[in-house]
Image (spheres, rainbow, N blue to C red):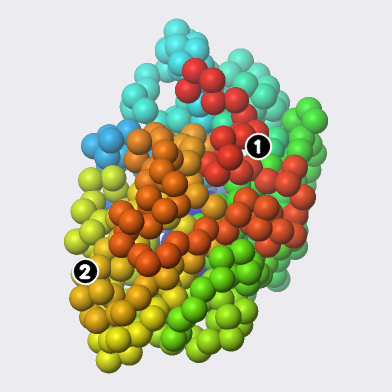
Amino acid sequence: MCGVFGIVSLEEVVPKIILGLYDIQHRGEQAAGIAVYDGKKINCYKERGLVTEVFNKKEIENLKGRFGLGHVLYSTIGDGKENFQPKILQPLLGNFRGEPFALVHNGNLIRLEKLREEAEEEGYKFQSKVSDTEAIVALLSISKEKDFLEALKKILPRLEGSFSLLILFRDKVIGVRDKHGIRPLCLGRDSNSFILASEESAFRTVGANFIREISPGEIVVLGEQGIEKRFIWAENPSLRLCIFEYVYFARPDSRIAGVRVASYREKAGNLVVQEHPTEGDFVCAIPESGEIYSHGLSETLKIPLKKAIFRNRYYAKRTFLTPRETDRKTLQRQKFYIIKEIVQGKKVVLTEDSIIRGNVSGEIVRMLREAGAKEVHLRVGSSPIRWPCFLGIDMVTKKELIAADLTEEEVAKIIGVDSLGYLSTEGMIKATGLPKESLCLGCFTGDYPISPENF
């Protein structure tokens, strides 16, 4: 899972790319990068860290141009060691028939062995042994097609997995969405610019307006005059949007598949306590992932909503997006603090978006107990995650998922709550307002839009 931002404009684009990346920073916190075409060449700068850490005046003074891409990284590959090598940070640069291009990717590709072998046989030298994004760059770089767009059209049907791509070639920014639209991509504009980005939230600070979402299997080409071409590249495209976008990843003010993310979270909060009623003195959210869910719970249970758990405002990172080797339990102690007088002797109804490995919510529950909470009842705005994801979320094995082979009662005992209620899969679907057939529920049900066989 990453965030992508592409822009063509009548003015310098780097300031807007940086602002846009701020507004999709929640999609990736491990690295950030920008590539800009100045009319002759592509200049690129990328480094590990948050957008505020990576870009300052010195780093961006050589990035000039009216056509550009930006990327924030959430790595979903390897064991954490390869992930931080600068050579796989994005944008990635390639060469098509002697001309440079830059590419950014949100998603995850699978079964790339034959494609990588083909590129190596044609003389392409891979910088990374694990980067799925570089496989796309390699195929474009070795293409015999004379036209870049024709080369891209021939490559896309060979890619398996999820992908929203942005490509900078000459004075064009090309946006591509996979045939199932598993990862989001949308179009916006202001008076001087046209923009493609992972989420609508990327348009807020730059002052652009949302136009529409890119359709599954669609290519959009932006030039100085706006949309120059658009067409469906895929056969039989059909929406299978990752429901985890609503549960956790996307920002609440974004619309995805026409549904406001905040709407899902509030409805999920309503529904989970209809399915799992409980008593308590007040509802409290685990910041910030449980915040909007808590409003739905409070409204339905008709008990107060109180803020008893606070997040250190100077600790900005999302725990789930941290590298695998992170000690997440210790991180919670650094990140959160609890007001003892609010929880002492009380029955707390706690809200969370999801439980993946159990180490985050478990530590919060321990902190509440230490602060004197009498009871803790946890309600979760999604179903138990029992299956791995190979389409862009870093949970690639069943053994790391706490609910994979356990009952809800067993999970409750491990994390230390008095009761635990997950929203049913049917409730999740209802909260989106979308038909089941339009959603990827793979990590909840094991039913994926793309076969995981041999992955």
Local crowd size for mark 2, using a 10 Å CA cut-off: few (<14), some (14–19), many (≥20): some
* 61 lies left or right of 432: left
Image point 48% across, 46% down: which residue?
385
Instruction: Work out whether 207 lies above or below 323.
Output: below
What separation in Å lies between label 1 and label 2 (alpha carbons)?
A: 40 Å
At label 1, the amino acid type is Asp
Image point 31% across, 79% down: which residue?
374
Image point 51% across, 30% down: which residue?
109
Image point 23% across, 59% down: which residue?
329
When asked about the image quadrant of residue 382, the answer is bottom right
Q: Earlier in the sequence, mark 1 or mark 2?
A: 1
Residue 161 in view: yes
In percent of width and height, residue 363 lies at: 27, 63
* 415 lies left or right of 273: left
In percent of width and height, residue 53 lies at: 29, 63
At label 2, the amino acid type is Arg
Q: Is mark 1 on a helix, strand or loop?
A: loop
Local crowd size for mark 1, using a 10 Å CA cut-off: few (<14), some (14–19), many (≥20): many
Question: Mark 2 sits on what residue?
Answer: 333
* 361 lies left or right of 206: left
Instruction: Work out whether 303 lies above or below 37.
Output: below
In percent of width and height, residue 188 lies at: 68, 62
Instruction: Work out whether 404 lies above or below 285.
Output: above
Q: Is mark 2 on a helix, strand or loop?
A: helix
When asked about the image quadrant of residue 311, the answer is bottom left
Residue 178, numbered label: 1
